[in-house]
Amino acid sequence: MKPVYVLLAGGLSSRFGDPKAFALWKNKPLYQWCKQALGGEALILSRPGLTDRFKSQGETAVLEDVEPFKGKGPLAGIYTAMEHQAGDIYIVLACDTPLIRNETISSLKKQIASGADAVVPVAGGRAQPLAAVYHKRVKQTICEQLRRDELKISDFLDRISVKYIDAEKIGAKNEEFVNVNKKSDLERLEAFYPE
């Protein structure tokens, strides 16, 4: 199965105050930690105002949401990736989860099985749909939901066949899924990733 790696980096970062993707942690932008976890190659889903900034960092595979779904959140980003690059499975990661390891992404990818539309890890008792694998067959479901302006990813997961898997069963630690919402969260990361 041909994988496509998708880095979601087009959020508004309203609680953070600045674009999270470019926030520095250990002298590296958050998005680069996540891109590294994806194996170093990824389609970066951006938004107007950030695209040029990514390109100035040397990124070439940068997309903005397709019309008419611009600014419609993570589902629009996933759909846009599916529209722009053919693949069998789409490995999706949000740009604010810098502790995720490449080994975790690889283990997750191996979990996609016939019949499952998605593999979503569960860490700390919570599903992690923005660090997950989606089969290409969900594209139409996403499109229909976006057309109805239903943007909740939880509603989408209710409409497809999801294989939920405990993070520990794929050798991942719960803290890998800690995401950065506020600037103070960058300090929290230190406890999990000491020098």
Image (spheres, rainbow, N blue to C red):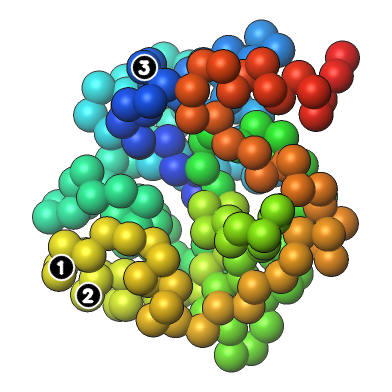
Residue 144 image label: 2
Is residue 173 placed above or below 31 in the rendered structure? below
Amino acid type of disc 1? Arg
Give percent across and percent down for residue 116: 58, 83
Q: Quadrant of the C terminus?
A: top right
Residue 75 image label: none
Q: Nearer the viewer, residue 36 or 160?
A: 160
Name the residue beneath numbered marker 1. Answer: 147
Is residue 123 placed above or below 112 in the rendered structure? above
Name the residue at 59% across, 23% down: 185
Distance between mark 3 and mark 1 Cα atoms: 30 Å
Give percent across and percent down for residue 191: 80, 23
Viewed as shown, does residue 191 lie left or right of 16?
right
Give percent across and percent down for residue 39: 70, 43
Viewed as shown, does residue 146 lie left or right of 32?
left
Name the residue at 75% across, 66% down: 166
In this view of the protein, can residue 20 be seen by the observer? Answer: yes
**Kind of element beneath mark 3:** loop
Name the residue at 84% across, 66% down: 169
Amino acid type of disc 2? Glu
Mark 3 or mark 2: name the one nearer the start of the chain: 3
Q: Quadrant of the N terminus?
A: bottom right
- Disc number lying in front (3 or 2): 3
- Disc number lying in front (3 or 1): 3
**Kind of element beneath mark 2:** helix
Name the residue beneath numbered marker 3. Answer: 17
Name the residue at 70% across, 53% down: 124
Please say if the residues under marks 2 and 1 sit with CB atoms less than 8 Å apart. yes
Give neighbour class at mark 1: few <14, some 14-19, many 20+ (Cα, 10 Å): few
Viewed as shown, does residue 130 lie left or right of 67?
right
